[in-house]
């Protein structure tokens, strides 16, 4: 069994980012956030260094309290 050390970083994979992107798009269907391939690549590039579970939780928390989609900066700040 693998044990995790304190401070170990788990970055977002492309598959995990796809889950986050779908959640944002589903929560804000009228928004044009990540509307094309170039936008998706840019968002992934800007968020890939974050821990997936923390990022997923931040997006879920944000979508429950905001009527407009999050910016990259807002996700990183949560």
Image (cartoon, helix red, strand yellow):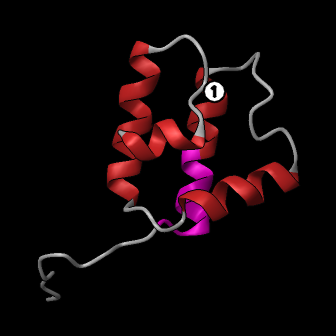
Q: Single out the residue that lies furthest toward the bottom.
A: 1
The local secondary structure at tag 1 comes to helix
Q: Where residue 32 sits in the image (x, y, percent)? A: 81, 28
Magenta span: predominant SS is helix
Where does label 1 land, which residue?
Answer: 26
Q: In screen coordinates, is 34 left or right of 25?
A: right
Q: Looking at the image, which residue is at 42% across and 26% down?
A: 62
- Position of residue 21 relative to residue 31, above or below, is below
Of residues 68 and 53, the one drawn nearer to the viewer in this rendering: 68
**Residue at horizontal 53%, vertical 42%?**
73
State whether residue 73 is above or below residue 1: above
Image check: 38 left or right of 9? right
Q: Which residue is at 63% across, 40% downward? A: 22
Identify the residue at horizontal 15%, vertical 81% (top origin): 4
Check the picture and name the quadrant holding the N terminus.
Answer: bottom left
Residue 25 falls left or right of residue 59:
right
Q: Give the range drawn in magenta.
A: 12-20
**Is 24 covered by the magenta stretch?**
no
How would you rate the neighbour count of disc 1 (Cα within 10 Å): few for under 14, some for 14-19, many for 20 or more? few
Q: Position of residue 59 (x, y in %)?
A: 44, 36
Q: Quadrant of residue 58?
A: top left
> Would you identify the image quadrant in which residue 61 lies?
top left
Rendered position, 7 above or below 14:
below
Q: Is residue 7 above or below residue 53?
A: below
Q: Where is residue 7 in the image (x, y as percent from the top left)?
A: 19, 76
């Amino acid at each position: 069994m693998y044990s995790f050390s304190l401070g170990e970083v788990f970055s977002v994979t492309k598959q995990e980012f796809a889950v986050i992107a779908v959640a944002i798009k589903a929560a804000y269907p009228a928004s044009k956030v990540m509307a094309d391939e170039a936008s998706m690549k840019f968002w992934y590039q800007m968020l890939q260094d974050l821990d997936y579970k923390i990022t997923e939780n931040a997006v879920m928390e944000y979508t429950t309290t905001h009527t407009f989609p999050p910016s990259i900066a807002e996700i990183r700040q949560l």
